[in-house]
């Protein structure tokens, strides 16, 4: 089956994009309980390899609900059935647009059979993976499949295999795929039937109450499933935050240790600088003392030389007594 863009979008071109899509395909067929840990492993591997953009895309992937995961399993594990189902959806939408009542009735029969069959396959795949679907989750899978038939955008998202939540059929599309039949004309009441009418109304009221109770139960189950899903997501986010906190704490401890070593080295360097500075000043003092002594010695040497010259000059002059 040709894959369309899923719920997270597909990057176009490049070996890197293909590599990320392959990892995302694996993630969205991974049971939701293992999704976050596998996602972080792949993101960490991408960061280690220097693929920052790949790591960002992988880390942004959101964990699917149980029903969305089961729907993704259908796309990846049953590509031929999924392809035929998408073709049925296109045909059903075309028939609905053209108001082809006969075609709608025929396609509606196929829709009910295939939705039921694919839902059972999704339940079987989830059970084989060790995560059986609840009744509420199975109804979400069925709602997703009906949405795929009714909505081309939903069909594209499901075909991408990266659903994170279940899909809802549009309200404007008939649930049974066929236009509503006109209501039969009301028959005039016949004599002697007036006593039966209150009983009929009571049965209708009882059926209506049962229907409302069933709807309330369905809503309660769906709310419970959403609450459980939200709890799982929050726990996963908490686990992510804990892991991030541990990593940053480790980095903080390493930085403090490096800072302590650097501060000790700085103190030692300053002490060495002070010692060398004192030695330099001592050396300069010795240099000035030696220079002064040299200057005095040179002056004395010159003076001694002049005295020698004067003495020699006197010695060369004749003595008057001679």
Image (tube, rainbow, N blue to C red):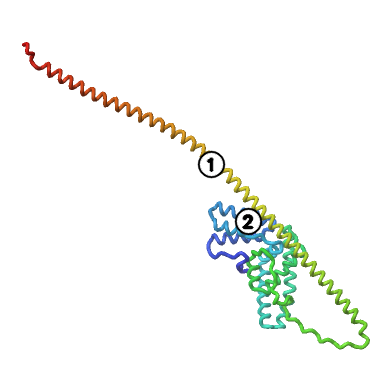
Residue at 54% x, 39% y is 260
Q: Residue furthest front?
A: 320
Q: Nearer the viewer, residue 5 or 265?
A: 265
Q: Nearer the viewer, residue 64 or 145?
A: 64
* Residue 209 rendering spot, x and y as whole percentages: 84, 72
Gap between marks 2 and 1 measured at Cα? 34 Å
Kindly identify which numbered label has been placed on residue 175: none
Q: Which residue is mark 1?
A: 259
* Residues tagged 2 and 1 counted as in contact (Cβ below 8 A): no
Q: Secondary structure at mark 2?
A: helix
* Residue 252 rendering spot, x and y as whole percentages: 58, 45
Q: Nearer the viewer, mark 2 or mark 1?
A: 1
Residue at 64% x, 52% y is 241
Residue at 56% x, 58% y is 54
Q: Relative to residue 285, is residue 67 drawn left or right?
A: right
Residue at 8% x, 13% y is 319
Q: Which residue is mark 2?
A: 39
- Depicted 60 relative to depicted 312: above or below: below
Q: Secondary structure at mark 1?
A: helix
Q: Earlier in the sequence, mark 2 or mark 1?
A: 2
């Amino acid at each position: 089956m040709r894959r369309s863009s899923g719920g997270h979008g597909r990057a176009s071109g490049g070996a890197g994009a293909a590599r990320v899509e392959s990892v995302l395909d694996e993630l969205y067929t991974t049971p939701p309980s293992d999704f976050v840990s596998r996602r972080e492993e792949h993101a960490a591997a991408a960061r280690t390899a220097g693929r920052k953009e790949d790591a960002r895309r992988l880390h942004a992937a959101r964990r699917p609900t149980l029903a969305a995961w089961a729907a993704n399993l259908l796309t990846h594990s049953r590509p031929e059935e999924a392809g035929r189902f998408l073709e049925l959806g296109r045909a059903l939408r075309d028939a609905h647009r053209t108001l082809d009542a006969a075609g709608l009735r025929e396609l509606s029969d196929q829709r009910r059979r295939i939705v039921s069959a694919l839902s059972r396959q999704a339940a079987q795949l989830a059970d084989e993976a060790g995560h059986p679907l609840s009744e509420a989750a199975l109804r979400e899978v069925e709602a997703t499949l009906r949405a795929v038939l009714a909505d081309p955008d939903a069909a594209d998202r499901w075909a991408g295999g990266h659903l994170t939540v279940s899909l809802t059929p549009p309200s404007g599309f008939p649930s049974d795929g066929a236009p509503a039949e006109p209501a039969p004309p009301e028959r005039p009441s016949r004599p002697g039937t007036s006593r039966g009418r209150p009983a009929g109304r009571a049965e209708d009221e009882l059926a209506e109450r049962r229907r409302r109770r069933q709807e309330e139960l369905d809503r309660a189950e769906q709310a419970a499933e959403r609450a459980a899903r939200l709890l799982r997501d929050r726990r996963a986010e908490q686990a992510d935050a804990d892991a991030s906190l541990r990593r940053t704490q480790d980095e903080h401890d390493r930085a403090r240790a490096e800072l302590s070593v650097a501060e000790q080295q700085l103190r030692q360097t300053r002490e060495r600088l002070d010692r060398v500075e004192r030695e330099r000043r001592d050396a300069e003092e010795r240099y000035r003392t030696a220079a002064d002594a040299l200057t005095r010695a040179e002056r004395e040497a010159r003076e001694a030389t002049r005295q020698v010259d004067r003495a020699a000059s006197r010695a060369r002059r004749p003595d008057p007594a001679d």
